[in-house]
């Protein structure tokens, strides 16, 4: 059975552990620098599984030795946003956290697939990639799955349809410059441009781009965690079950979409060994302009962090 380590026993990490256990994806280790927090949440999750006649056990720990030889390591640790903050405001403090974690991961699980959830995701996953020395097919950022879920929700609400009937795709940065693709959004195969006005589409795209901020402002003490926790486990499931499934993730581009040397959210095929293929889809002139702006922001933020860390 595969071994899955989740680093960070906060809300996102705990809900990722719940989702992984519910789906019975493998042996789950929940690690946090506060070992008792990790142990307490792991025990609570394990006991909850018994209510579903599910025999999965989640193990809590504060010791990286317990994570040794993990097949997949998920990094959720880091500072979350507060009202008035953007994901970019978290760069420097979360960079130090991610680097220290990845250094331990390399020692204890050198052959794992690494998935980053810590914000700002596109910059943190690039930092993890450079720190780890892993091949690009084994380093993934959770990005467009969460944003696509929000896109589905807003479309379904607008049209009074089931979210399961909506197909979406969101590319670029996991932030306010993300690119929800209107031309790739359909309801039961019908393009949304045929179902609502241009004005309503623009309103919904804005809601998607600021969907995380809306939740932060309502919670006041943190950011979203139910949806991010479930979103990252979609990646894990696709890998462990070798689904060859196409999902939007932040991955390292080397010429694809005319982007070189940056982690950008694009659709990829996921399987047992991680990223099997980067899927290049056609972008309209409007979408391409927004995508290039998003990529430029990713590169600028990442370069600023590099300069500060020199």
Image (cartoon, helix red, strand yellow):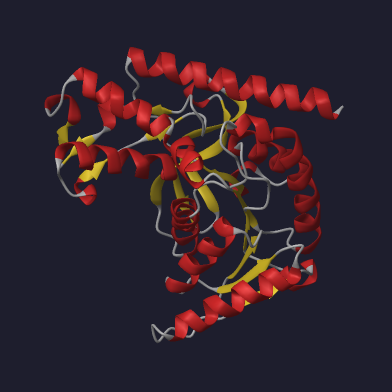
Q: Quadrant of residue 290?
A: top left
Left or right relative to 186: residue 280: right
- Between 274 and 285, the residue placed more toward the observer is 285
Could you tell me if residue 100 is visible in this image? yes
**Residue 9 sits above or below residue 136 on the image:** below
**Residue 108 sits above or below residue 235 on the image:** below
Residue 257: x %, y % from top left: 47, 23
**Residue 57 sits above or below residue 218 on the image:** below
Q: Name the residue at 28% across, 38% down.
A: 154
Image quadrant containing the N terminus: bottom right
Left or right relative to 74: residue 96: right
Q: Name the residue at 68% across, 48% down.
A: 78
- Between 32 and 285, the residue placed more toward the observer is 32
Image quadrant containing the C terminus: top right
Left or right relative to 22: residue 138: right
Residue 298: x %, y % from top left: 60, 25
């Amino acid at each position: 059975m595969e071994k899955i380590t989740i680093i960070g026993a906060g809300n996102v990490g705990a809900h990722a552990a719940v989702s992984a256990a519910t789906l019975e994806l493998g042996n789950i280790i929940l690690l946090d620098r506060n070992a008792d927090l990790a142990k307490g949440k792991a025990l609570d999750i394990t006991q909850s599984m018994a209510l579903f006649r599910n025999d999965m056990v989640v193990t809590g720990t504060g010791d990286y030795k317990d994570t040794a030889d993990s097949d997949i390591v998920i990094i959720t640790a880091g500072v979350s946003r507060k009202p008035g903050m953007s994901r970019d405001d978290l760069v420097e403090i979360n960079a130090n956290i991610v680097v220290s974690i990845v250094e331990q991961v390399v020692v204890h699980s050198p052959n794992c697939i690494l998935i980053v959830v810590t914000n700002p995701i596109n910059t943190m996953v690039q930092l993890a990639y450079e720190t780890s020395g892993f091949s690009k097919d084994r380093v993934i950022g959770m990005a467009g799955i969460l944003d696509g879920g929000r896109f589905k929700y807003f479309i379904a609400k607008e049209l009074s349809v089931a979210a399961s009937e909506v197909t979406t795709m969101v590319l670029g940065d996991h932030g306010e410059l993300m690119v929800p693709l209107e031309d790739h959004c359909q309801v039961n195969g019908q393009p949304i441009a045929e179902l609502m006005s241009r004005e309503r589409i623009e309103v919904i795209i804005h809601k998607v781009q600021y969907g995380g901020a809306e939740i932060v402002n309502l919670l006041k003490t943190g950011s979203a965690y139910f949806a991010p926790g479930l979103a990252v486990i979609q990646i894990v499931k696709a890998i462990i079950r070798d689904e060859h499934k196409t999902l939007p993730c932040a991955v390292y581009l080397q010429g694809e979409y005319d982007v070189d040397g940056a982690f950008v959210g694009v659709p990829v095929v996921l399987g047992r060994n991680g990223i099997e293929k980067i899927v290049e889809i056609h972008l309209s002139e409007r979408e391409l302009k927004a995508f290039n702006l998003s990529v430029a922001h990713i590169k600028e933020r990442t370069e600023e962090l590099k300069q500060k860390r020199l």
